[in-house]
Image: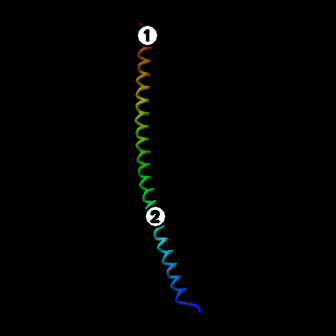
């Protein structure tokens, strides 16, 4: 004898289980997305800090180079004027 109600019950159970599995998977992916978004924000912040630091160091190098150039000119002028 064939049980029609049994097939429907099994189908509903399978669908419910699949829905639950997909809901858990969705939640996991949403959590991962959130974590990755936070990580991107942190990395962008770190990159910005690095760029700012690099700019400061480049400005310092330019200032020191200018001071060195001025020192060389001053030294050469003193030597030649003696």
Q: Position of residue 16 (x, y in %)?
A: 48, 78
Q: Which residue lies furthest to the right in this view?
A: 1
Which tag, 2 or 1, sits closer to the chain's start?
Answer: 2
Q: Where is residue 12 in the image (x, y as percent from the top left)?
A: 50, 82
For this view, does 13 lie left or right of residue 41? right
Q: Name the residue under label 1.
A: 79
Disc 2 vs disc 1: which is toward the camera? Answer: 2
Towards the viewer: 82 or 14: 14
> Of helix, strand and loop, which one carries label 1?
helix
Q: Where is residue 55 in the image (x, y as percent from the top left)?
A: 42, 37
Relative height, residue 25 to residue 41 (above, below): below
Q: Position of residue 72 (x, y in %)?
A: 44, 18
Towards the viewer: 34 or 10: 10
Q: Mark 2 points at which residue?
A: 28
Q: Which residue lies furthest to the top in this view?
A: 82
> Of helix, strand and loop, which one carries label 2?
helix
Q: Quadrant of the C terminus?
A: top left
């Amino acid at each position: 004898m064939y049980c029609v109600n049994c097939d429907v019950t099994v189908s509903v159970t399978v669908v419910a289980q699949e829905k639950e599995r997909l809901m858990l998977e969705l939640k996991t992916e949403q959590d991962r997305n959130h974590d990755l978004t936070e990580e991107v924000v942190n990395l962008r912040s770190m990159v910005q800090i690095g760029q700012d630091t690099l700019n400061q160091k480049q400005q310092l190098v330019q200032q020191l180079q200018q001071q060195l150039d001025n020192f060389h000119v001053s030294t050469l002028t003193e030597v030649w004027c003696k």
